[in-house]
Amino acid sequence: MQGAKYDPARSTNDIAKAIRADIKAAMGKPAVDPWALPKGLKVSVRLDKFAGGCSITARITAFPGALLNPAAVVAQKLLPNEPLRYSRLTKEGDRVVAVLDGLMADYNFDKSDPQSDYFHVRFYGDAGVHHDYAAQRKLELLASPHLADLLADLAVTIAGRDLDMAKRTIATLNEGYADVPTERRELEALLFPKQREAA
């Protein structure tokens, strides 16, 4: 895989600057464009160099609107030992992270072969939500009046050992995904329609 803007002569410092510029440009796109980023979004793009390579990370530090999926937040809070079946972010949160990943991938190449434990990339990179900001948004969501009341009711249900009822109630909070793999397919179809048609 090689990104459309990959240039072997370009330094990683210049790549990080270019990614920041692309993020800013994406905020100016019309909202109907699947590659648009919402106004009010703040993203920290960081370059870290280390022996044998470097990494570029994009971390959301401010997000307009709903960011965390209430179903995932409640499930993690009340059923921490159960496997998480829900996306951690809302549909819009997941779309924004996918766009950020795509903008970074434009400057990268990947000739890795995980089966033989061989990794060869221009830089390691990923996008996501900054952990401190995610924790802050999680606390805000848990403290919201409608969710605080539901948490109290669910805690009683779980204490009464009616886990099935608790799980069904939590499922009603889900942001409309059937499951995480379905969500990923929907995002790929939205952001990369030509690749999906060719497949």
Image: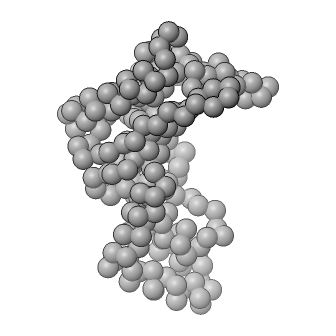
Residue 167 location (% of width, % of height): 54, 72
Display colour scheme? one colour
Q: Is residue 176 above or below residue 2?
A: below
Please indicate whether residue 135 sits to the left or right of residue 51 in the image.
left
Residue 29 location (% of width, % of height): 22, 31
Q: Residue at x 62, y 86 (%)?
A: 161
Quarter holding residue 50? top right
Is residue 74 visible to the viewer in this orientation of the structure? yes
Q: Residue at x 47, y 20 (%)?
A: 107
Residue 143 location (% of width, % of height): 37, 76
Q: Residue at x 55, y 68 (%)?
A: 76
Which quadrant of the rendered structure holds the N terminus?
Answer: top right
Q: Is residue 76 above or below residue 183?
A: below
The residue nearer to you, when weighing 171 against 58, is: 58
The residue nearer to you, when weighing 133 against 35, is: 133
Give the residue furthest to the right.
116
Residue 198 location (% of width, % of height): 48, 19
Please indicate whether residue 117 sits to the left or right of residue 183 in the image.
right
Q: Is residue 127 above or below residue 144?
A: above
Is residue 97 visible to the viewer in this orientation of the structure? no
Marks counted in the figure total 0
Q: Residue at x 32, y 79 (%)?
A: 145
